[in-house]
Amino acid sequence: MEIVLYVMLAVILFVVVFALVSIARRKNIPVNSGKFEVFSFSGSQLTVLAGIPVTYDVSAIENVVFTKQRSRAGGSYTGILRIVKTDGKKSRPFIFDGSVVAKKLMLVSTEQDINNAITCLKDELRAHNIRSSW
């Protein structure tokens, strides 16, 4: 009986993942493209690829705010960015790590890795005339 339950859960999980990927492709959301990229620019739009991709009009962005946070377990750091729109609303926090600069999977990011990633991301935003602060 337990085996049947596990098989059913596995099938349901497969269907859910397949449906999410299908929806993402149908809506032209990049799936695993630019695996270590945080931003994607197209025309006058900025797409934040960290986590679930979200697209913003560049004209609606007032500022991008970067912070860093040390994990409670171990010495790893993560970077956090939030989009501040011209109407004063803030986006949800987007999380990134040192993979942005290294272009490879990093299980642990040092504080210096996050500082380098933030500098790199700020330069990328500056190239598209988007203000950012740290």
Image: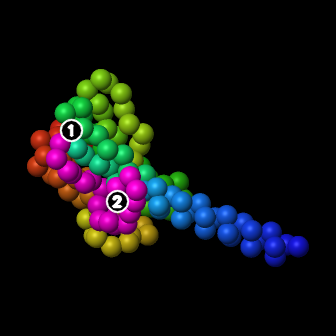
Q: Is residue 129 left or right of residue 113?
A: left
- Residue 112 is situated, as x and y percent measured from the top left of the image, at 29, 60
Q: Residue furthest top?
A: 87
- Residue 27 is situated, as x and y percent measured from the top left of the image, at 38, 52
Name the residue: 33% across, 73% down.
104
Name the residue: 24% across, 59% down.
116
- Mark 2 or mark 1, whichever is nearer to me: 2
Identify residue for label 2.
30
Q: Secondary structure at mark 2?
A: loop
Does residue 115 show up magenta in the picture? no
Does residue 27 show up magenta in the picture? yes
Name the residue: 88% across, 73% down.
1
Q: Main secondary structure of the magenta part?
A: loop
Q: Is residue 132 above or below residue 5?
A: above
The amino acid on which the numbered mark 1 sits, given as a three-letter code, is: Val
- Residue 30 is situated, as x and y percent measured from the top left of the image, at 34, 59
Q: CA distance from mark 2 to mark 1?
A: 19 Å
Q: Which residue range is magenta in the image?
A: 25-44
Identify residue for label 1.
58
Nearest the viewer among 90 and 76 is 90
Tell how many labels: 2
